[in-house]
Image (cartoon, rainbow, N blue to C red):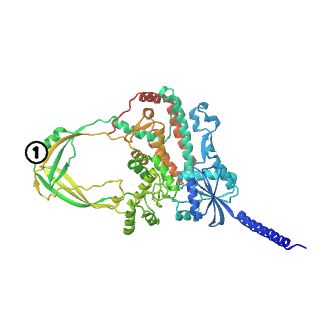
Amino acid sequence: MFSFFQRSCFKNFENVIKYTYQCKSVRFRCDSNENTMKRVLNVAEKNDAAKNIAATLSKGNSSKREGFSKYNKIFEFDYNLPNEGQCKMVMTSVSGHLLSYDFDDRYRKWWSCDPVSLFDAPIVTKVTPDCARIQQTLEREVSNAKLLILWTDCDREGENIAFEIIKVCRAKRPNLKILRARFSEITFGAITRAINNLVAPDQRASDAVRIRQELDLRIGAAFTRFQTMLIQKIGEQVKDKLISYGSCQFPTLGFVVERYKQIKEFVSNPFWYVDVKVKRDNLIVEFKWDRGRLFDCDACLSLYHRILLNPRAKVTAVDGRRKTHWRPLPMDTVSLEKLASSKLRITAKQTMTIAEKLYNKGFISYPRTETNIFPSNLNLQPAVEAQVANQAWGSFASQILREGIHPRQGRKTDNAHPPIYPIKSADNLTADEAKIYELIVRHFLACVSADAVGFETSIKLDINGEGFHASGLIILERNYLDVYPYVKWYGKEIPDLRLNEVFVPDEIFMREGKTTPPSLLTESDLIALMEKHGIGTDATHAEHIETIKSRTYVSMTTDRKFLPDQLGLGLVDGYVAMGFELSRPHLRANLEKDLQAICDGQKDPNVVLREQIVLYKEIFSDAMRRSNLLSTNVQRCLRENITIRTS
């Protein structure tokens, strides 16, 4: 017989056994459900993007764990995926490109081959050493995944990175199903639309990047080895220097050299003009001569004497008209880079690095875009509402909401991304991040508000047969100017003169001036030239500028303008002396057109590759035969004192 205490213990022990069995059973069923739930691997281009996309899709309920790379975390959550049902979503990231192109071992060493053979040498593709741990994470996570969803940036480069991810994952799971998410901003609406409308990755866009990468490797390596081995022999000044070549960096350098030469070779010419001033109502107004200026002193003096014979001025026209000062177009990448450089003194490279961070954190839309047209179906009201609480421009945003959102529209679109605009308010940003974010916000609010309006009065005078003119301006409505300090529009008062009124001006003088050379290029000027001539893309302008700076082909003056260094000048002069267009924009611009044609399905990528290799190989062979011209010009320029007045 058991005692009461023993029976109680036995009873409790029975319950424990029973409870434990039930818990195990429940846990087994849960584990079983989790194991049968389809696993989906999601891969973004950067860790911040993965983090924010996961937070958006999971509504803040994702869990985090470590990957093999400490910089690329893994986020997990359950999600009811269209056409797939309830899935276990695994979200991670890469850090840009996974793969690199290089020659095989036979051609990798500089002295292993004639540089011309690099145009035909075998190329190997491999995961970069920095990305080995990211590769490990992808291989582990894809091993039991049924589907891969790519969340890389939706441009050419992002598409190529997506195919690099595919290559790594397919090596582990050959029959893996793969889809692509397309989005331009990391917001709930955009990410939800993207996951509900998954598409196939764009092979054409990736091919365009692949062709460009291979060409850049072959052309760059061949010319770099040729130049370096030739020029290092010149003397101590360049003995250990790498003399790199790139089919984008050289035309970029060419623009700087061309402007320098225009200034250096500029011959100033004197000119003469007649200046008339009228003082009335405590105002002084200067009337400009209709002829502008004359380069013949005697001719100007003759006309001046004729004016003085009868210096009575007659008002021949008084016209008033409404004047509009246009608000800015929606912001694309080039305008962002140019404005940040010219107005904020932040380089294009720094600007794009900051813009990428702001995008990945969900503060702005995708910053690499050629579009300056807001799509008609894009609701901009939430973007304006997000700025209402800001102390600096919140009242202006509120005014826009009251008066209506009417964006000014441009004419360019890449059919991929909208213009750059703010998605949500941002606090606690660092100094330069805050400046770039403020520029984007103010530009956006300006372009969706109203143009500034003024009233311009124009007056024409006749003095003994010679015409003069002046104008004044009254600003009636500042509108966008109240939020956009990056442009100035000033009013200018002029005296009240009546039609047919006759009077003697207070001053009539003949003055002398002289023509002045153009100024050195600013970064904003250089980006504008690169865009105009098709050198690089909106995604690469900043990179090419940084390259010619880091190679010391150019330097910056104290007022932030580009001046060629001796070596940069010598290289350009050398290739020009050979008769080649390597420092001119045409060759690269034609390649960029071909790359776009690949994206549009109008050209076969392999045909473009063959044609470009044949073209550059022929130029390279000629360059080697005329190498003395390059060597001679570099030696000459290394002795040149490159100084110039920058004012």
Left or right? Give the position of 374 relative to 47: left
SS at badge 1 = helix
Vertical order, 179 against 631 (above or below): below
Report the number of numbered marks: 1
Q: Is residue 312 left or right of residue 262?
A: left
Residue type for callout 1: Leu
Answer few, some or many: residues within 10 Å of disc 1's Cα (few below 14, many 20 plus, some between 14 and 19): few
- Residue 296, position as x, y percentages in the image: 20, 39
Tell me what residue is drawn at x 22 percent, y 55 percent: 471
Image coords of residue 645 (percent x, y): 33, 36
Tell which residue pokes out farthest to the right in this image.
1
Coordinates of residue 607 in the picture (x, y in percent): 56, 46
Q: Is residue 529 above or below residue 22?
A: above
* Image quadrant where residue 180 sits: bottom right
Foreground of the two, 198 or 222: 198
In the image, what residue occupies the spot 55% across and 48% down? 209
Instruction: Name the residue tied to disc 1.
Output: 308
Where is residue 439 drawn, in percent x and y?
41, 54
Q: Quadrant of the C terminus?
A: top left
Q: Is residue 491 above or below residue 296?
A: below
Q: Nearer the viewer, residue 239 or 409?
A: 239
The answer to whether 313 is drawn above or below residue 270 in the figure is: below
| In the image, farthest residue toward the left | 309
Seen in the image, is 301 located left or right of residue 145?
A: left
User: Is residue 504 in sight in this rendering?
Assistant: yes
Q: Is residue 604 visible?
A: no
Q: Quadrant of the N terminus?
A: bottom right
Q: Residue at x 45, y 36 (%)?
A: 553
